[in-house]
Image (cartoon, helix red, strand yellow):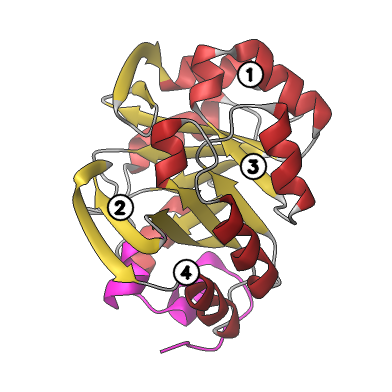
Amino acid sequence: MELWPAIDLRGGRCVRLLQGDYDRETVFGDDPVEMARRFTAGGARRLHIVDLDGAKTGTPVQAELVGRMVAAAGVPCQLGGGIRSVETARAYVAAGVQRLVVGSVAIENPALLAELAQAFPGRMVLGIDARDGKVAVRGWLETSPLGAIDVAKRHEHLPLAGVVYTDIAKDGMMSGPNIPALAEMVRAVHLPVIASGGVSNADDIREAAAAGAAGCIVGRALYEGSLTLAAAAAAAGEPSATDAG
């Protein structure tokens, strides 16, 4: 299973939110470029980056910073937040981003998602952020009436790289992923599913793998020290990484 250490950006800093609430923010670093270097120096094989400002505004707010992070990391990077046009996607791909996560577009402009998937086959990832089983959009500030699985099945025919599935109630809470909901998503769609939200220890990663997840995003646990990068990689079944400390 692929391990994706997460770096969330807001105002040029590394942050984590509790349950997607912009008013419940913890700052974990003032230098996201150095954070990217630290993760890869510790053995991270890939990074998951989120432009929280972009997710909220619908525009690529942190594009310049993301470009510097990708260059510094030197590993495949997956980016979400503010990708709502072909032009934005093309610019990020040109900057070296390997995969782009889109969420709100799937709800608000399905035709654009199809256009993006066809323009960048195998590089677009459907981001499904669920609150009580319903899909949240625009940086989790709004909740649609559509069910998470319904949205995934509606788009699984596209040439997507996979689905990032986040249970918002679990995100940042260090209480473990919503394994039943994750397993249900894995069973429902043919695309690879990446688990996100709630991972606090190695057992959580192993449970996500057992549920059939193709990958797992880990954030707060790495920053707070309840999980080391080496332990996370081992739980995911990846070759051992040097502990970054």
Query: Can the viewer see residue 234 in this picture?
Result: yes
* Residue stretch rendered in magenta on the structure: 218-245
Gap between marks 3 and 4 measured at Cα: 18 Å
Instruction: Say left or right for 32 vs 40.
Output: left
233 in the magenta segment: yes
Q: Secondary structure at mark 1?
A: helix
Which residue is label 2 attached to? 198
Which residue is label 1 attached to? 155
Q: Earlier in the sequence, mark 4 or mark 2?
A: 4
Gap between marks 1 and 2 measured at Cα: 26 Å
Which residue is label 4 attached to? 32
Residue 122 in which image quadrant: top right
Q: Secondary structure at mark 2?
A: loop
Q: Secondary structure at mark 4?
A: helix
Q: Secondary structure at mark 3?
A: strand
Image quarter (top left, top right, bottom left or bottom right) of the N terminus: bottom right
Between marks 3 and 4 in the image, the one whose residue lies nearer the viewer: 4
Query: Can the viewer see residue 210 in this picture?
Result: no
Residue drawn at x 40%, y 12% is 146
Local crowd size for mark 1, using a 10 Å CA cut-off: few (<14), some (14–19), many (≥20): some
Position of residue 222 relative to residue 164, above or below, is below
Gap between marks 3 and 1 measured at Cα: 15 Å
Between marks 3 and 2 in the image, the one whose residue lies nearer the viewer: 3
Q: Tell me the amino acid under the disc marked 2.
A: Gly
